[in-house]
Amino acid sequence: MALGTGVGIAAQALAAKLAAVVPETAVVSPPVEKNSSPPEPDPFNTRGPSEGNRIALTFDDGPAPGVTDRILDELKQRHLVATFFMIGERVAASPELARRVAAEGHEIGNHTYTHPKLNSLPDQQVALEIQQTQDIIGEIVNCQPRCLRPPYFAFRKNQSAIPHGKGLSIIYCDVDSKDWSDPGEAKIIDAILSQTKSGSIILCHDNHQQTANCIGEILDKLLELKFNFVTISSFVDAPQIAS
């Protein structure tokens, strides 16, 4: 009887030691990852969502008589839409052409009034370039752009509050045709077809004859690939205007 009691006491002591080392209900906390806070959202939209095989075809620097109208003819023939980022002073110079863009169902974006490098300007001048363009497009076309594309993509993140405060999204691209360098029609076509995928934002210019010469072929080949053409505002929600 005494022996049994001694064994029982020893067993209890051993169990207590084990419990102290590995508690019966121990919970191991996961390691805390360093820098685990969510990344800051990028204010520049370079592409849209990949669902639906949608793409946004965009044109900068117009409206330009003799080029923009030829591009519009090709889009109209195929019942396709695009987004035209217009320079304010060119809207003032070609008001009928700007109106035609809107009348045929295309979106008009803000590409500043004089096409400067915004990252080299003080905030007050940046705001003026953007607002003058909003005003002239509103006056002539009777619509307000919902998106801005900075000329040359020369824009700093800390300037983003200026267009956002006016309800404008900032639009970049993930497909650059480089038609601005007049590389030849074959290279423009290849640049677009080799890079475009679902969600792509394609950058072209509607003040270059080479673009007008080959845009019909580009549109046909993109249609063969079953892409659906949408405007930029279908891809990107405009930011709320700061109160």
Image (cartoon, grey):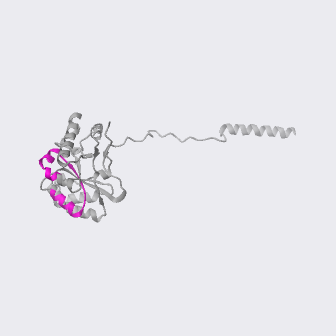
Up-down relation of residue 100 to residue 88 (above or below): below
Is residue 118 visible to us here? yes
Q: Quadrant of residue 3?
A: top right
Corner quadrant of residue 177: bottom left
Front residue (pair 111, 144): 144
| Image coords of residue 160 (percent x, y) | 29, 39
Of 21 and 51, the residue lying toward us: 51
In this view, the residue farthest toward the right is 1
Q: Is residue 20 above or below residue 70?
A: above
The x, y position of residue 187, in whole percent, is 20, 58
Q: Quadrant of the C terminus?
A: top left
Secondary structure character of the magenta stretch overall: helix
In the image, is 107 to the left or to the right of 69? right
Q: Is residue 207 visible?
A: no
From what the image shows, is residue 233 above or below residue 118?
below
Q: How many marks?
A: 0
Residue 128 figure quarter: top left
- For the N terminus, the quadrant is top right
For this orientation, the residue located farthest to the bottom is 224
User: Would residue 33 appear left or right of 186 to someone viewing this image?
Assistant: right
Q: Nearer the viewer, residue 202 or 75?
A: 75
Report if residue 143 lies within the magenta region: no
Q: Position of residue 188 (x, y in %)?
A: 21, 57
Where is residue 42? Give x, y as percent. 34, 43
Residue lying at 76% horizontally and 38% vertically, measured from the top left: 12
Residue 79 in magenta stretch:
yes
Query: What span is colored magenta in the figure?
Result: 69-98
